[in-house]
Amino acid sequence: MNKINYSKELEKRIEEFQKKNEVPKLLLHACCAPCSSHCLEYLREFFDVTVFFYNPNITESEEYHKRVLEEKRLIEAYNKQVDEQDFEGMHSDEHARKIGIIEGEYDPKEYLDAVRGYEDIPEGGERCRKCFELRLRKTAEIAAKEGFEYFTTTLTISPLKNADVLNEVGVQAAEYVNGKKASDGEMPGREIAFLPSDFKKKEGYKRSIELSQKFGLYRQDYCGCGFSKAERERQKA
Ligand code: SF4
């Protein structure tokens, strides 16, 4: 079976929007500022982007608050560039748009309930799939509720995360939310759609490291949950 190149899929969608002079409203699930840096630099040229920071998987509250503050600081810096039309050192140009942010609820119990029974599975396995399902389903729900046309996630920028799984989970989240809206008898409207992505491709991951340095972003060395932190500590030891 041919592997899907999700980065190319995204480019094809963007070309279609451009042909039609469309700037779709996109809700971008973001896990942290370093991962958001390249995704936002790229997407703000083509979409009206709002970040959705929803990460109950970051089980330590201090760590969660550190990451959300960095996310807000990065967005402020990007928005200032747009106000001042100053894109020095950036790939962006005058087409860059300002970015909004919605902070989701922070309740680590939601995450712990979602991964119950999978705690000991190493990073990259079924525990992560459950974690993606929780975060992307919530993103799809908020996107539908708030009138976005598309949603996607920064998570595909990580070389440690499987883009096939993430894109599959994203499509399933859209199907779930659209199906729920239909069965709840909501007025038919435009359905919410998952935007395919693989942000690590085309040197996206490398660019996120450059941008993290440029903005002095706090860059954690583990994914987010206590299980991944313990795994990283074991590897370091
Ligand atoms: S390692 Fe990351 S993706 Fe996997 S369960 Fe933990 S927080 Fe979620």
Image (cartoon, rainbow, N blue to C red):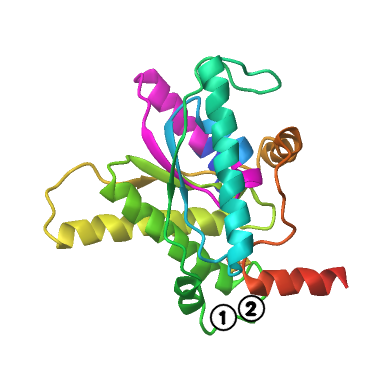
Residue 197 location (% of width, % of height): 53, 43
Question: Looking at the picture, which amino acid does disc 1 mark?
Answer: Tyr
The answer to whether residue 83 is left or right of residue 213 is left
Count of marks placed on residues: 2
As rendered, which of 17 and 39 lies closer to the eye?
39
> Which residue does the numbered mark 2 point to in the structure image?
121
Which one is nearer the viewer's eye here, 97 or 67? 67
State the residue position of label 1. 118
Q: Is residue 201 above or below residue 138?
A: above
Q: Start and end of the magenta stretch?
A: 10-36
Q: Is residue 91 above or below residue 133?
A: above
Q: Find out whether residue 14 is within the magenta segment.
A: yes
Residue at 52% x, 27% y: name it: 79
Q: Is mark 2 within 8 Å of ligand 1?
A: no
The N terminus lies in which quarter of the figure?
A: bottom right
**184 sits left or right of 204 in the view:** left
Residue lying at the far bottom in this picture: please name it: 117
Residue 162: x and y, percent? 61, 57
Q: Is residue 40 left or right of residue 213?
A: left
Q: Is residue 198 visible?
A: no
Q: Are marks 1 and 2 in contact (CB under 8 Å)?
A: yes
**Where on the image, by quarter, is ligand 1?**
bottom right
Q: Secondary structure at mark 2?
A: loop
